[in-house]
């Protein structure tokens, strides 16, 4: 089996590649080739016994997508995107990567299929950013697309394209709308959602973190581990069971900032919690007020996607995966 | 005021141009220029006292859209599209006109705005084809996008683009999802929906018409007159009242084929009804089964869009507008 990851240099892409390399299989089938693509060269995962192909290029160029897809992978994970904040600031660039890039990928698959029958599985990562306020406390599987950012608009368009190209038989598409990934490893960044991770990750290593919103702010989370599980499950699930509405809200963990902090206290004590500095930021408060808080992700649950159990578990898994298993 | 119609050679575009030419105003403001654009040269409307500019070109070409929009119209009606059946048969062509063409238009508006501030009103005609089965008996304003054709997908994407470009302040967009236009003037065509019009229009002039479905098939209709009213109302309505969810399900008339036929009987007698030949066509029955039947178009009604009152009225207006006012 040949597995391709488009957007392999990002956090999710890297963890996905590591996971597949470690397992050596996907859905029980051996993976012989792993192709890692991104705008910069991705790191090759350690310990993979098959062939690793690493290329860099820009999917905003049709030729790049065409060249990449000529290797006719069996499974394609499409994770590549300009993130929310950047797509908002750089309108043309966001559309070039997130919309044109996605279409170039799908069209390159179509062109391959027109040469010799071929119908790869395509896992498209979408986002809860396709939903914008006002919405109900719990968003269900029938909720309408109401993006309020260019990023959310571009993801919604990607979903529609995926469904149409699938319906026409050019690819076997499935889209997963990921909750916010928390705890995101790495250093604090300027994303408005960054604090959800910062207030846990930084205190765990003895560093201060700024909390710009109230403790009662509720949000929808997924751990990196579960996010990777979602992607591999989507890559191997029976699509007959999914049907033609092939974009799914992933199950997440709905928690308030206060609940996150209490989980941190249980796992790492008051010492960690005391490193959280409250600095209300009206701009971030306003942005966050427009984000989904909770979902009833029934379809995904029925299809075997599994959410995180608790923030205690998320924090403990972070310590295991990112901090060598112990707090210093 | 300078009004531009993109897709002016089609039935709706032609009637819209005639309407504006006859009124000489839009929303109470005098119209000095009417620019009519399509892939073929549109006919100029009779009796307009301002300037008429007619051009032909293909909006699948960015340069064409750029050249067209350089005249900086105040109001743009975007009606241009490859129709449903053709978009399904010619995948690339459908995307080139319906998706790329729409984006080229919006981008050309954006480029103008970047040169000198300018924010035209853009009325985008969408379609109930953005909804696909299964759905409830009545579709409400909160119903999700579930297109099951490439045409419906392209219209849904156009809606998302319109909303995003509006949110960013590049244009003042409003989208109207038109019901099926009935009675469509002209000759029978091969559209799967054609029979809804054929069974009224043809018998009114003494010609046979084929009815391929059962009398209890229910569908969602708008007369040509009301469709034009929708467009001119959308062009002049206060967008503050519409808000950021700027795509509206238009109010229509939900009627069964049997109800259409009884209206024909009341207006034109048994003689007309007897010209309807029942020839069940399983393929058309199946296609039609996937179409919306009824809506609760509350938002549009509250915003002053008005539906047809009855099929009797639709038929009488058709006789007035298309048959010189009397049956022969």
Image (cartoon, coloured by chain):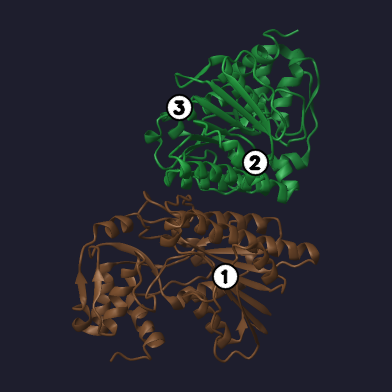
Chain colours: A brown, B green
What residue would you read off at disc 1?
Answer: A234
Chain letter of disc 2 in the image: B
Task: Give the position of the C terminus of chain A as an image quadrant.
Answer: bottom left
Neighbourhood count class around disc 1 (C-alpha, 10 Å): few under 14, some 14–19, many 20 upward? many
The Cα atoms of the two marked residues, 1 and 3, are separated by: 46 Å
* Residue A286 horizontal/vertical position (percent): 29, 55
Closest to the observer, B194 or A85: A85
Q: Where does the image place residue B145, in percent across and percent down from the top left?
A: 54, 48
Q: Are marks 1 and 3 on the same chain?
A: no
Residue at x 22% of width, y 75% of height: A276
Q: Are marks 1 and 2 on the same chain?
A: no
Q: Which mark is residue B9?
A: none
Q: CA distance from mark 1 to mark 2?
A: 42 Å
Q: Nearer the viewer, mark 1 or mark 3?
A: 3
The answer to whether the residue labelled 2 contacts the one labelled 3, judged by CB atoms less than 8 Å apart, is no
In this view, the residue farthest toward the front is B115
SS class of the residue under badge 1? helix
- Could you tell me which secondary element the residue under label 3 belongs to? helix
Secondary structure at badge 2 equals helix
Which residue is at 60% across, 71% downward? A57
Q: Closest to the observer: B107 or A170?
A: B107
The image position of residue B198, as x and y in percent, is: 74, 25
Image quadrant holding the N terminus of chain A, namely: bottom right
- The spot of residue A106 in percent (x, y) is 65, 61
Q: Residues within 10 Å of mark 2 (few under 14, many from 20)?
A: some
Label 2: which residue? B64
Mark 3 surroundings within 10 Å by alpha-carbon count, few (fewer than 14), some (14 through 19), many (20 or more)? some
Q: Tell me the residue that label 3 is attached to.
A: B236
For the question of whether residue A118 can be seen, the reply is yes
């Amino acid at each position: 089996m040949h597995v391709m990851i488009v957007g392999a240099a990002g956090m999710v892409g890297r963890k996905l590649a590591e996971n597949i390399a470690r397992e050596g299989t996907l859905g029980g089938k051996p993976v012989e080739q792993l192709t890692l693509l991104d705008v910069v060269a991705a790191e090759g995962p350690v310990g993979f016994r098959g062939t690793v192909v690493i290329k860099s290029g820009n999917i905003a160029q049709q030729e790049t997508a065409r060249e990449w897809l000529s290797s006719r992978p069996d499974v394609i994970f499409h994770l590549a995107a300009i993130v929310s904040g950047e797509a908002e600031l750089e309108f043309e660039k966001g559309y070039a990567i997130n919309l044109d890039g996605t279409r170039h990928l799908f069209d390159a698959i179509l062109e391959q299929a027109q040469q010799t029958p071929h119908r790869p599985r395509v896992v498209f990562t979408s986002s809860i950013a396709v939903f914008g306020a006002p919405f109900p406390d719990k968003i269900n599987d029938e909720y309408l697309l109401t993006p309020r950012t260019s990023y959310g608009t571009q993801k919604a368009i990607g979903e529609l394209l995926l469904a149409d190209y699938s319906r026409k038989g050019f690819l076997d598409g499935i889209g997963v709308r990921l909750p916010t990934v928390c705890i995101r490893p790495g250093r604090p960044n300027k994303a408005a959602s960054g604090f959800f991770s910062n207030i846990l990750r930084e205190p765990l290593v003895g560093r201060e973190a700024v909390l710009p919103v109230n403790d009662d702010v509720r949000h929808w989370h997924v751990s990196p581990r579960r996010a990777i599980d979602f992607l591999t499950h989507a890559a191997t699930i029976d699509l007959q069971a999914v049907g033609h509405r092939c974009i799914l809200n992933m199950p997440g963990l709905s928690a308030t900032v206060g609940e996150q902090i209490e989980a941190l206290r249980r796992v790492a004590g008051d010492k960690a919690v005391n490193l959280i500095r409250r600095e209300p930021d009206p701009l971030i408060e306003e942005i966050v007020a427009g984000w989904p808080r909770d979902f009833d992700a029934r379809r995904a649950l029925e299809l075997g996607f599994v959410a995180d159990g608790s923030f205690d578990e998320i924090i403990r898994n972070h310590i295991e995966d990112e901090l060598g298993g112990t707090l210093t």
